[in-house]
């Protein structure tokens, strides 16, 4: 890519693009090129900050016309590869949120984050299948499947999608639904950003005015016994209950009691759609013993989501690994406890139960996830200190032990290694996604992310 090509593309956009453009060296370039995920830094040739849905189409056409790689970013939580030398299309400003309380649906722009939807929907006693952090972009999270604190109750966020306005690789603006472009609609509900740029997403909301929820803390010494109780208790966990058990180092946040700041503890997260959560959770809490902090209670949905997730993390560099399991033998639990020990450099190690509505999709469900796998272990190594080797070494040891028992699968919105994209899907769904990719993006324009390359054209001659 030459400077002339970049300049030509920028000049062409200036005449047709209503949003702002930023080139290297411009004021605002550094602010707009960076996303939430700071493990790497992107250095795009040009940043185009869309002000309208029409700008999205203009940017896609300009990238095609001038043979520029194209990357798309709203919040940057899902960034997994650098956009070096690319045209980076920012959709952050397209953050509209409309709630239709009668139909119980939300219609959002690609820049909307879950905090926007949570607040707007809560006025009507409604809730979406929100992400763990309120600053996560709704559209990217949902296209990648989206596993919520309500997903055992209502399914993946992708399962709730009603329609999507999309700009395709050819620069065509269309609406995908179960009846219009059904192959594209299927792929969008879990296949990530491989098939177009979504300029508006419509999805179902659920009546969730108040929930029993929170994250309570316990002594780390109770970790193995609690995890052992969890693997058995979770198998009979009602679909209304959504839970996870973590070994976590608490941040130095004013929201954390001062004696616990920076301390490593056992944590139980729970989110129950009903008013008897304390009764349902009681056997698990008994295994954990007396809490250091008991934070469970009935709350309105937005407050419940915040209480269960904890404070939103600032932009950071980290490495995240997730493995899926059909069962949790003792060796897996011992590996988790050792990786989450008091002197561990990991931010947290989490064991989570899936299943419920996620495992019972409708006949037209999209490709999100490995729906029949009940457990996951996820660990995060923060790259906060100059020496990353200790965090990487601890995570490598954990992953090495886990993989002896894991299925080999993963989940797209929790996967940060783009070379493992295929593992987020069943073999049949991956093959079908590759075929849809061939139909809608044969030139693989949308490849700067969790890329699914187009399937070979069977009609092509060798």
Image (cartoon, rainbow, N blue to C red):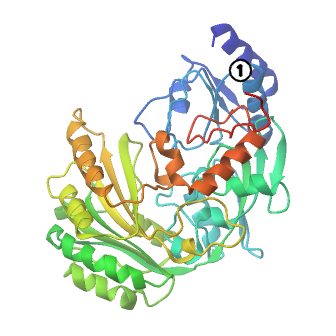
- Residue at 21%, 34% in the rendered image: 387
Residue extending farthest to the front is 462
Give left or right: position of 160 versus 422. right
- Seen in the picture, residue 188 relative to 440 is either above or below; the reply is below
> With 428 as the anchor, is 269 left or right in this view?
left
Q: Give the camera-side residue of 404 and 129.
A: 404
What is the number of callouts on the image?
A: 1
Residue at the image position 26 percent from the left and 64 percent from the top? 332
Q: Where on the picture, by quarter, is residue 280? A: bottom left
**Residue 382: image x %, image y %?**
31, 44
Q: Position of residue 69 (x, y in %)?
A: 64, 26
Q: Nearer the viewer, residue 118 or 376?
A: 376
Q: Residues within 10 Å of mark 1 (few under 14, many from 20)?
A: some
Q: Is residue 86 above or below residue 101?
A: above
Task: State the residue at coordinates (61%, 24%).
Answer: 86
Residue 393 seen in render? yes
Q: For numbered disc 1, what is the local secondary structure?
A: loop
Which residue: 28% across, 82% down?
285
- Tell me: 339 left or right of 78: left
Q: Quadrant of the N terminus?
A: top right
The foreground one among 334 and 121 is: 334
- According to the image, label 1 marks what residue? 67
In the drawing, does residue 183 fall left or right of residue 324? Answer: right
Image location (x, y in percent) of residue 385: 24, 37
Screen quadrant of the C terminus: top right
């Amino acid at each position: 890519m030459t400077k002339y090509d970049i300049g030509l593309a920028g000049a062409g956009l200036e005449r047709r693009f209503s949003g702002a453009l930023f080139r290297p060296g411009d004021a605002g370039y550094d602010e707009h090129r960076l996303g939430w995920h700071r493990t790497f830094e992107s250095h795009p040739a040009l940043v185009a900050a869309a002000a309208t849905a029409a700008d999205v189409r203009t940017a896609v056409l300009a990238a095609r016309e001038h043979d520029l790689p194209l990357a798309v970013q709203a919040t940057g939580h899902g960034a997994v590869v650098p956009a070096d030398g690319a045209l980076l299309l920012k959709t952050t400003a397209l953050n509209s949120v409309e709630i239709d309380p009668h139909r119980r649906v939300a219609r959002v722009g690609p820049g909307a984050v879950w905090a926007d939807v949570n607040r707007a929907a809560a006025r009507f006693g409604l809730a979406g299948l929100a992400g763990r952090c309120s600053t996560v972009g709704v559209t990217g999270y949902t296209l990648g499947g989206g596993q919520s604190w309500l997903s055992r109750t209502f399914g993946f966020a992708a399962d709730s999608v009603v329609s999507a306005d999309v700009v395709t690789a050819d620069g065509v603006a269309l609406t995908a639904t179960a009846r219009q472009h059904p192959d594209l609609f299927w792929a969008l509900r879990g296949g990530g950003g491989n098939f177009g740029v979504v300029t508006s997403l419509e999805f179902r909301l659920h009546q969730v005015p108040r929930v029993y929820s929170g994250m309570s803390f316990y002594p780390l010494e109770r970790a193995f016994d609690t995890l052992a109780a969890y693997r058995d208790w979770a198998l009979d966990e009602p679909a209304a209950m959504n839970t996870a058990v973590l070994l976590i180092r608490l941040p130095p946040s004013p929201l954390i009691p001062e004696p616990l700041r920076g301390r490593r503890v056992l944590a139980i997260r729970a989110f129950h759609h009903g008013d008897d959560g304390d009764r349902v959770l009681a056997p698990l809490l008994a295994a954990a013993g007396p809490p250091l902090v008991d934070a469970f209670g009935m709350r309105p949905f937005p407050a419940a989501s915040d209480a269960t997730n904890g404070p939103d993390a600032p932009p950071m560099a980290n490495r995240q690994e997730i493995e899926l399991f059909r069962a949790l033998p003792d060796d897996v639990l011992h590996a988790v406890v050792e990786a989450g020990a008091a002197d561990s450099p990991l931010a947290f190690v989490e064991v989570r139960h899936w299943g419920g509505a996620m495992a019972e999709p409708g006949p037209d469900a999209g490709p999100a996830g490995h729906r029949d796998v009940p457990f996951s272990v996820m660990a995060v190594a923060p790259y906060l200190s100059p020496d990353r080797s200790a965090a990487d070494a601890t995570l490598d040891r954990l992953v090495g032990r886990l993989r002896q028992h894991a299925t080999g699968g993963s989940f797209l919105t929790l996967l940060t290694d783009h070379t493992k994209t295929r593992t987020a899907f069943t073999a049949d769904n991956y093959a079908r996604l590759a075929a849809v990719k061939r139909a809608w993006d044969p030139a693989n324009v949308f490849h700067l992310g969790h890329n699914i390359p187009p399937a070979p054209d069977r009609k092509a001659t060798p």
